[in-house]
């Protein structure tokens, strides 16, 4: 056990101190920071000071009411209650007003809205929105449509409706959106009603699947490269006399696992730090993501599937690295494992909106794809408890089986030099060793 700890500690210190690991972590952390602050950076380059106040600055728009003062007042009152597209209206008597022209020249207003009498006659004015320099804002257009709806209803109905009836007419229809599983639709016993998953769970699922794929690929290639480098430099001949091959293999896998955890911890601090910035709190608040909606069971199972999935891919990378004599041949050798991880990633990421199809259900029990696909089903409440545990049992069995095979390949391959051994040669050499 002391030798195992020595190998783990040596591998961790050696990989964590390399310039490639340090610079990769720094660059990815910087890219993550930039990506999370893109809305704030855009506002700075546009000259918008929304980021300094922690909220959205209202858009300054001119308003020419003409004789339609009631409609203009309704629009102004409605705008005060809106936070998605805050607009501050400034009244002007007409389009030729000197004050409006000066405000446009000084870029104090983004455009103006004019309520004009329609050519064919009518009780409600024609709304003419003129945007200066930029394309007409869809947010302002939506605000105009919603804000003038009540005024139009009042103009058409006159005094025949009470204020309460007008409010009910202009109030948008409430839609209760929910999802139903195929089992519930068919009336299958034990089917539970699907609750609203929440946007935050979709975001966390995306992050966890991307995290598993990138981490498994980076650390897996590190394991294979470490084994191949020691083998090609003939250091393995010295190590093999002092430490058992099995101890070496699992020591390297666990040591690099801690390196991956260190990198994930750094990225977690970067994400948490950026989320705490005032301008990001205001921006993310507009996405309607609430911590109360987060499926914490998904986080717990996600950690378990991440650890088990890492070790499954880790033993495969170690086995492949042991049969390659030159680092130049490593990329081609690990290609099949890379393709497996890509399949797992793509099945999960492209079926996030269709998590009940047969492909997802079958893939959630296959050990090579279950770390991402079963995580998807757990996050969207599509998996029963017995399905989750069955997937975990199959994953553990796969780790033991492939770990046993990888140990025999590793013990045989680390001392086989020259061309890459064939499957027949490996089988013959593996029979000489018993694990």
Image (spheres, rainbow, N blue to C red):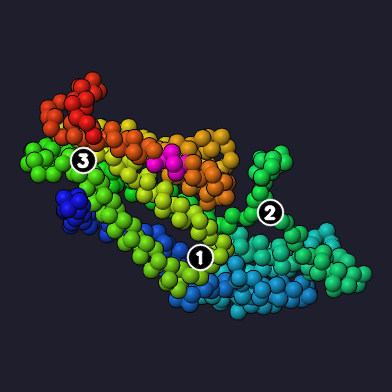
CA separation in Å, label 1 and label 3: 48 Å
Q: Which residue is mark 1?
A: 284
CA separation in Å, label 1 and label 2: 23 Å
Q: Looking at the picture, how far across and down is residue 61, in whole percent? A: 61, 72
Q: Which residue is mark 2?
A: 177
Which region shows up in magenta?
Answer: 391-396
Neighbour class for label 3 at 10 Å: few (<14), some, many (≥20)? some
Tell me where residue 174 sits by quadrant. bottom right
Tell me where residue 12 sits by quadrant. bottom left
- Residue at the right extreme, as displayed: 160
Which numbered tag is attached to residue 246? 3
Q: Looking at the picture, how far across and down is residue 293, in whole percent? A: 56, 61
Q: Nearer the viewer, residue 87 or 322?
A: 322
Q: Nearer the viewer, mark 3 or mark 2?
A: 3
CB under 8 Å between discs 3 and 2: no
Q: Quadrant of the C terminus?
A: top left
Determine whether, in the image, residue 251 is placed left or right of residue 176. left
Neighbour class for label 2 at 10 Å: few (<14), some, many (≥20)? few
Q: Looking at the picture, how far across and down is residue 431, in whole percent? A: 21, 25
- Identify the mark nearer the N-term, 1 or 2: 2
- Identify the mark nearer the N-term, 1 or 3: 3
CA separation in Å, label 3 and label 2: 55 Å
């Amino acid at each position: 056990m002391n030798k195992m700890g020595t190998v783990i500690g040596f591998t961790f210190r050696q990989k964590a101190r390399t310039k490639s690991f340090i610079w990769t972590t720094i660059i990815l952390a910087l890219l993550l920071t930039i990506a999370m602050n893109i809305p704030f950076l855009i506002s700075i380059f546009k000259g918008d000071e929304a980021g300094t106040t922690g909220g959205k600055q209202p858009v300054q728009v001119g308003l020419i009411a003409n004789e339609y003062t009631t409609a203009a007042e309704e629009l102004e009152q409605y705008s005060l209650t809106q936070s998605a597209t805050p607009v501050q209206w400034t009244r002007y008597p007409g389009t030729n007003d000197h004050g409006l022209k000066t405000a446009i020249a000084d870029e104090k207003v983004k455009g103006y809205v004019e309520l004009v009498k329609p050519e064919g006659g009518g009780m409600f004015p024609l709304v003419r929105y003129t945007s200066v320099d930029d394309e007409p804002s869809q947010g302002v257009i939506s605000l105009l449509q919603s804000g003038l709806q009540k005024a139009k209803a009042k103009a058409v109905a006159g005094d025949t409706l009470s204020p309460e009836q007008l409010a009910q007419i202009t109030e948008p229809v409430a839609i209760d959106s929910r999802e139903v599983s195929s089992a519930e639709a068919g009336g299958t016993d034990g089917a539970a009603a699907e609750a609203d998953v929440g946007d935050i769970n979709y975001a966390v699922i995306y992050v966890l699947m991307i995290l598993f794929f990138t981490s498994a690929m980076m650390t897996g290639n590190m394991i294979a490269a470490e084994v191949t480098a020691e083998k090609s430099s003939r250091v393995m001949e010295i190590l093999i006399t002092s430490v058992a091959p099995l101890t070496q293999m699992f020591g390297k896998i666990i040591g690099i696992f801690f390196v991956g955890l260190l990198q994930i911890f750094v990225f977690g601090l970067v994400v948490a730090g950026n989320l705490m910035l005032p301008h990001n709190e205001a921006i993310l608040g507009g996405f309607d993501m609430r911590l109360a909606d987060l499926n914490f069971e998904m986080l717990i199972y996600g950690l378990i599937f991440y650890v088990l999935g890492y070790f499954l891919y880790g033993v495969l990378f170690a086995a492949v690295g042991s049969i390659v004599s030159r680092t130049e041949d490593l990329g081609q050798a690990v290609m099949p494992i890379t393709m497996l991880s890509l399949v797992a990633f793509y099945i999960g990421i492209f079926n996030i909106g269709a998590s009940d199809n047969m492909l997802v259900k079958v893939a959630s029990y296959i050990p090579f794809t279950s770390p991402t696909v079963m995580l998807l089903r757990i996050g969207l409440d599509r998996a029963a408890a017995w399905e989750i545990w069955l997937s975990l049992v199959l994953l553990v069995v796969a780790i033991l089986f492939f770990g046993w095979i990888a140990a025999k390949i590793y013990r045989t391959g680390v001392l086989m030099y020259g061309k890459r051994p064939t499957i027949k040669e490996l089988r013959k050499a593996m029979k000489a060793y018993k694990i």
